[in-house]
Image: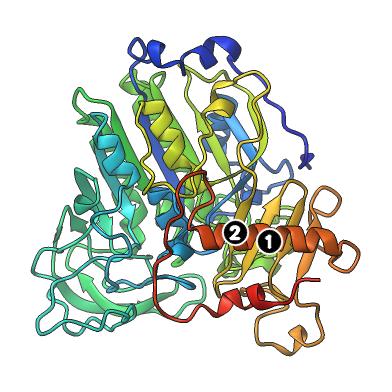
């Protein structure tokens, strides 16, 4: 298990790479192509390059890791889908938006307003061709047959949605030149493909599946849509974009639909893992990654292409943890909890980066980082400035990636968020959780009898207790108050980066901040 307090950088390109960050040198080095592959509900312990005891041999992701750098203490912005995607594309914690807990749905309106700078629109200013392929799950302003829905209605049934008309606000309005994908998770209707701003084929039937692992909700399904073929279809589209990329540098955001439910491994992958359908589906994810890597090699552009593989949150219990545990496989590795939780298993994620032209093979970094940091990092690599009203929670990782000698710590703190909106803050070895239980789906669950009598807060020393088993809140009251004050400041300032105070969005109740009214000692 990695030492969580020690920062080290192995196999990096040192001063030569760091010198490329000097503004005067940038013109002599073109900006890299950038590919972000975001898996859906993949656990840290599912990858054999991160977990030597994994029952799953992820050969292509392992190949990516051998050729690049592994970050062992990376975190998603949330323990569930939508908020993490918001943070990745905006560099801002999603709890600053109107979405204070939970996720959006297939008919929800856009969470990102058109005036907000995104990772894609920022890179477009630097001459990039931008594309999004895969799961969007950030809301779409569908046109409606009659009237407007209330501003706070994020889970309407879609009865008044006109799928034949173009989307009014979606990926191509937020910086992407091209989009091919699905509205939300693969278990959320409507089940249609969208190319740019139009549905490719209107629904001709209703489908649904009540199977535990193959589950998807009943809903309208496009004439060209087959749940079993979605991952392969999206991978074909991603490969096609790379092949027709043009002369400009490109940014591809490839948001996989797997291994999220419905867990539907393709025929050639069924039984291959020796575990269960979830394990087989992870191997299909690995195959999709391999197809991207093989395409870069075939086109001879792998050296100048930065490829990042990561996940939006931890593994879902739909994977069937008891069955996997009986086989000796642990998707959350040594960490407590899983998807939706404030515990590490909810938000500690794989983060593997390869860029042969600038990053030597075999690197490892133990910095604590967050997916919101991609915004400032890619801005630095592309030579773009981040304005004060963008990337409020994004820190530049390029000193670590490029191997600056003895770089200072990148982040003073990371804020975590669970599905019910519970907060935690991480600073070095210390993690303070502002709730008595998981804040999610694992025990002790919010509202359960297990919560009764538990301390209001949880404090863990992750260097000594990576599994978050010994609550130190009574032993270190000074640390509790220090972290609580820091979190309150991050919330109230509207940003965690230096700069002018910004506002958080949303006028509704924010009950998850009740801890801010607790008296200080």
For mark 1, give the secondary structure: helix
Q: 28 or 234: nearer the eye?
A: 28
Q: Which residue is mark 1?
A: 485
The answer to whether residue 127 is left or right of residue 400 is: left
Residue at 20% in and 78% down: 205
Residue at 44% in and 74% down: 215
Mark pair 1, 2: CA separation: 6 Å
Where 303 sits versus 151, above or below?
above
For mark 2, give the secondary structure: helix
Where residue 351 appears, as percent x and y from the top left, is: 56, 41
The furthest residue to the right: 475
Q: Which residue is mark 2?
A: 489
Q: Residues within 10 Å of mark 2 (few under 14, many from 20)?
A: few
Image quarter in which the C terminus is found: bottom right
Q: 478 or 46: nearer the eye?
A: 478
Q: Are marks 1 and 2 in contact (CB under 8 Å)?
A: yes
Residue at 73% in and 62% down: 432
Image quarter in which the N terminus is found: top right
Where residue 176 appears, as percent x and y from the top left, is: 23, 45
The answer to whether residue 34 is left or right of residue 51 is: left
Count of marks overlaid on the render = 2
User: Within the image, what quadrant is residue 65 found in?
Assistant: top right
């Amino acid at each position: 298990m990695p030492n969580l307090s020690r920062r080290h950088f192995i196999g990096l390109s040192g001063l030569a790479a760091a010198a490329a960050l000097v503004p005067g040198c940038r013109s002599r080095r073109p900006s890299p192509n950038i590919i972000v592959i975001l898996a859906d509900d993949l656990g840290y312990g599912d990858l054999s390059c991160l977990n030597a005891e994994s029952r799953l041999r992820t050969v292509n992701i392992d190949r990516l890791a051998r050729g690049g750098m592994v970050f062992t203490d990376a975190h998603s912005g949330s323990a569930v889908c939508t908020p993490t995607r918001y943070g990745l594309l905006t560099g801002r914690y999603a709890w600053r938006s109107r979405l204070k807990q939970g996720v959006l749905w297939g008919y929800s309106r856009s969470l990102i307003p058109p005036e907000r700078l995104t990772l894609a629109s920022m890179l477009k200013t630097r001459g990039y061709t931008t594309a999004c392929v895969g799961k969007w799950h950030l809301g779409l302003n569908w046109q409606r047959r009659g009237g407007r829905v209330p501003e706070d209605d994020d889970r309407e049934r879609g009865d008044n949605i006109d799928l034949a008309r173009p989307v009014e606000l979606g990926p191509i309005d937020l910086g992407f030149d091209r989009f091919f994908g699905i509205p939300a998770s693969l278990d959320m209707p409507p089940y249609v493909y969208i190319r740019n701003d139009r549905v490719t084929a209107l629904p001709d039937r209703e489908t649904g599946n009540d199977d535990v692992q193959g589950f998807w909700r009943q809903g309208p399904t496009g004439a060209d849509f087959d749940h079993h073929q979605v991952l392969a279809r999206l991978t074909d589209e991603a490969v096609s974009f790379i092949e027709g990329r043009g002369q400009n540098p490109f940014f591809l955001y490839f948001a996989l639909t797997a291994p999220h439910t419905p867990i539907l491994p393709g025929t050639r992958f069924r039984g291959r893992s020796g575990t269960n359908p979830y394990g087989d589906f992870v191997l299909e994810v690995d195959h999709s990654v391999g197809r991207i890597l093989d395409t870069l090699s075939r086109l001879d552009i792998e050296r100048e292409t930065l490829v990042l593989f990561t996940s939006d949150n931890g593994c879902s219990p739909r994977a069937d943890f008891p069955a996997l545990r009986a086989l000796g496989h642990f998707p959350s590795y040594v960490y407590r909890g899983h998807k939706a939780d404030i515990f590490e298993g909810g938000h500690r994620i794989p983060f593997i980066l390869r860029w042969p032209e600038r990053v030597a093979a075999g690197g490892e970094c133990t910095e604590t980082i967050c997916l919101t940091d991609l915004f400032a990092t890619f801005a630095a690599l592309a030579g773009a400035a981040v304005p004060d009203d963008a990337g409020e929670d994004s820190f530049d990782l390029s000193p670590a990636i490029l191997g600056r000698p003895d770089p200072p710590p990148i982040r003073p703190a990371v804020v975590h968020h669970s599905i019910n909106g519970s907060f935690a803050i991480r600073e070095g070895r210390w993690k303070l959780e502002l709730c008595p239980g998981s804040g999610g789906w694992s025990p002790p669950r919010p509202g359960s009898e297990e919560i009764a009598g538990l301390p209001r807060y949880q404090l863990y020393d992750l260097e000594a207790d990576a599994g978050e088993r010994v609550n130190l809140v009574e032993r270190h009251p000074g640390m509790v108050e220090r972290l609580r004050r820091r979190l309150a400041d991050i919330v109230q300032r509207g940003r965690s980066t230096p700069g002018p105070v910004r506002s958080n969005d949303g006028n509704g109740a924010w009950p998850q901040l009740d801890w801010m009214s607790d008296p200080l000692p």
